[in-house]
Image (cartoon, grey):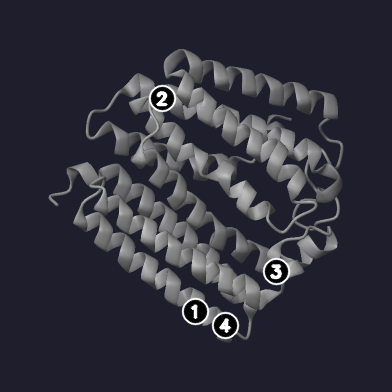
Amino acid sequence: MFKRYYYLTKPGIIYGNSLSVIAGFFLASKGLFHPLLFLATLVGIGLVMASGCVFNNYIDRDIDEKMERTKKRALVTNKISVKNALIFGTVLGIVGFGLLLYFTNVLTAFVAFIGFFFYVIVYTFSKRTTVHSTLLGSISGAVPPVVGYVAVTNHFDIGALLLFLVLVTWQMPHFYAISIFRYADYAAAAIPVLSVKKGMKETKIQMLLYILAFLFVCILFTVFRLTGYLSLIAMLLLGIWWLLLSVKGFKATDEKKWARKLFGASLLVLLVLCLVLSVDVYLPF
């Protein structure tokens, strides 16, 4: 039973986003580590994200039953009751926001609430009606590093803004890749993602443009002296590799296979990005 509730929180999303929380926290800390603040921030936003995922599962259960990937989820198969799921999600949210309010600051809790609202309400409902839901959903996905950052600084500055923008520009090609290799699922559930509504070519163009935007934001981190040149070089080399892989998609004969490769590459890009943001203060230049 515990396992069912655990997967109801979409742990993969929580762990992935936790990396960006850590990156934002360490970038703002500038080498001064606050263990209790770090732990409270990570656990607090983790519980808030878990709560959002539970509510998302509740709202999306009619869509999930139509998709091969999600048709065995606990709320679809009635292995967890709707009532219990709502109670579970509510408790997670209350505890998560409570931790952020008590151990961090009001701004951190407010930023976390924005992410929660955009994921549970704006994204969850817009993905049924508009191709722009991916962009709207990227807002919630870009909140975790900002939460980590403002938990330390208690103000929204250029660092917080660039963290938000770099995650938005990273997420778009990442999720567009998913929409290509999961095309059949989205089409079956009548979800108007870009690949279904506008076709593969338009999706590939958008992916290319967002990766270029991602590279530009990476440069801005160094321009505004938030990171040094070693971090910049690392991200540019990796970003250019990601870009070249994106270009190859226009001649791909097996689009699903190519999209999976691009998806995997995006995960590596995120991992390295979070790493360089976290350790940049310790690099020589």
Residue behind mark 2: 39
Residue 73 vs 251, above or below: the answer is above
The extreme top residue here reads 102
> At x 24% / y 35%, what residue is drawn?
30
* Viewer can see residue 270: yes
> At x 58% / y 33%, what residue is drawn?
114
> At x 54% / y 30%, what residue is drawn?
112
Q: Are marks 2 and 1 in contact (CB under 8 Å)?
A: no
| Residue 165 picture location, percent across and down | 45, 49
Q: Mark 2 packing: few (<14 Cα in 10 Å), some, or many (20+)?
A: few
Q: Are marks 1 and 4 in contact (CB under 8 Å)?
A: yes
Residue 18 vs 194, above or below: the answer is above
Q: What is the spatial separation of the Cα atoms under label 3 and label 4, in whole angstroms?
A: 14 Å
> At x 76% / y 68%, what residue is drawn?
197
Q: Quadrant of the N terminus?
A: top right
User: Mark 1 belongs to which amino acid?
Assistant: Val
Q: Label for residue 250? A: 4
